[in-house]
Image: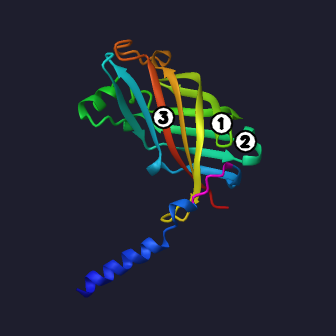
Amino acid sequence: MNRVLTIAASVAAFAISLPAVGQANQDATAVQAGDYTVESTHTQVQFSVNHFGINDFYGTFPGASGSLSINPKNLAAARLDVTVPVSSVSTTNKTLDEELVSADWFDAAKFPTMHFVSTKVVKTGPKTATISGNLTLHGVTKPVTLNASFNAAAVNPLSKAYTLGFKASGRIKRTDFGVSKYAPLVSDETTITITSAFEKKAN
């Protein structure tokens, strides 16, 4: 009984120590300027294609890494550099995952990563911007533009790191990158959706 009470007290103390959701700052102008790294465990790159005209189908690439340099007073100077491991692809279908990393699709053995480097950032609203850059996928580099929005900033109650949250989306034609299997039965146009967390580097 005492052990149960001790555990309950510990859980309660932990819960009390957590900041309320409302304490996350959604004011983009209040973001701390500096250099950040991708918080991989809470960052995902999702793609969707239309499957034979029947339904939309989704997959996810976890395990992203990279960096962000940002100053809200000079957003145009922001720099983003992100790498995503292709072999991490997950569709919840093991057989399909194995097919996607094969030479017929992403060819992860030969081209193990996707890489995006920003070239231009343009503010479009209080919490939004377009991020133009070069995407390297399947050994091909093409310009891509992402529509990004700022979610919030807060100190992560577990890691204690000051963390920024963003969402971004864009569209590519996969055949432009040489990923042409079953196109256009499986749609050429591919939607990319990114949810990302960035932790500020310690000074």
Percent position of residue 11, x then y? 37, 74
Residue 25 located within the stretch drawn in magenta: yes
Tag 3, which secondary structure?
strand
Residue 24 appears in view: yes
| Element at label 2 | helix
In the rendered structure, are the residues bearing label 3 and label 2 in contact, judged by CB atoms less than 8 Å apart?
no
Label 2 Cα neighbours within 10 Å, binned few <14 / some 14-19 / many ≥20: some
* Relative vertical location of residue 31 with respect to residue 90 in this rendering, above or below: below
Report the front residue among 48 and 106: 48
| Relative height, residue 25 to residue 78 (above, below) | below
Tell me if residue 104 can be seen.
no
Mark linked to residue 129: 1
Q: Earlier in the sequence, mark 2 or mark 1?
A: 2
Mark 1 Cα within 10 Å, few/some/many (few <14, many 20+)?
some
Quadrant that contains the C terminus: bottom right
Q: Give the residue number, with chain letter if any, for mark 3.
A: 193
- Could you give the CA–CA distance between mark 2 and mark 1, rounded to whole angstroms? 9 Å
Quadrant occupied by the N terminus: bottom left
Residue contact between numbered discs 2 and 1, judged by CB atoms under 8 Å = yes
Given the image, on which type of amino acid does mark 2 rest? Leu
Q: Secondary structure at mark 1?
A: strand
Q: Residue 181 appears in which quarter of the rendering?
A: top left
Which residue is outermost to the front?
A: 22
Type of the residue with mark 1: Ala
Pointer 2: what residue?
A: 75
Left or right side of 50 for 161: right
Residue 44 placement (x, y as % from top left) = 45, 42
Specify the quadrant of the image occupied by residue 25: bottom right
**Span colored in magenta:** 24-28
